[in-house]
């Protein structure tokens, strides 16, 4: 299976179907995964908790890999996530980037960057145009 296909399966099964059991199939047991905070390694339980929390805030999650590049054991991808706020149904669009190293069709190392600022604005956790205000 190609690395992009594995990542697409991850997004489909976990984020669209809520199947947390797939975590053990996609990530090697001794993986060095990072969800959002650089330098902070996350465990399988951390990943499951992060996904469960996100699934409480969002519905109809539709991730799309819009660009990807594979080089050797590595995959880099840009992802657009369209979803709806679970509380109001309002649409949300957020982007993320992932860089992952694979071994035997499993992720052994991963760095993820998610636009949490934009997501927080769209969830109503920050005022509109908060980034523009912060930059002034």
Image: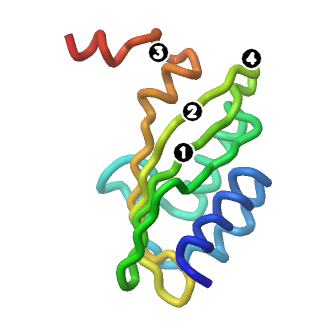
Query: To which residue does mark 1 refer?
Result: 80
Q: Earlier in the sequence, mark 3 or mark 2?
A: 2
Q: Nearer the viewer, mark 4 or mark 1?
A: 1
- Quarter of the image where the N terminus is located: bottom right
Query: To which residue does mark 4 refer?
Result: 88
Tag 4 and tag 1, C-beta contact below 8 Å = no
Residue at the location (43% across, 58% down)? 98
- Quarter of the image where the C terminus is located: top left
Q: In which quadrant of the rendered view does residue 68 lie?
A: bottom left
The alpha-carbon separation of the residues under discs 3 and 2 comes to: 15 Å
Mark 3 neighbour density, 10 Å: few (under 14) some (14–19) many (20 or more): some
Q: Nearer the viewer, residue 38 or 83?
A: 83
Looking at the image, the residue that sits furthest to the bottom is 104
Residue at the location (61% across, 28% down)? 92
Residue 63 higher or lower than 105, as above or below: above
Residue 79 higher or lower than 44, as above or below: above
């Amino acid at each position: 299976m190609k690395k992009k296909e594995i990542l697409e399966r991850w997004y489909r099964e976990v984020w669209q179907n809520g199947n947390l059991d797939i975590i053990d199939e996609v990530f090697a047991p001794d993986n060095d995964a990072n969800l959002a905070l650089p330098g902070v390694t996350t465990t399988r339980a951390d990943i499951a908790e992060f996904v469960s929390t996100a699934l409480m805030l969002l519905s109809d999650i539709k991730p799309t890999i819009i660009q990807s590049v594979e080089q050797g054991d590595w995959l880099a991808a840009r992802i657009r996530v369209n979803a709806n706020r679970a509380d109001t149904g309002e649409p949300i669009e957020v982007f993320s980037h992932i860089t992952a190293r694979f071994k035997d069709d499993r992720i052994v190392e991963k760095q993820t960057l998610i636009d949490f600022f934009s997501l927080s604005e769209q969830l109503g956790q920050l005022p509109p145009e908060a980034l523009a205000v912060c930059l002034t």
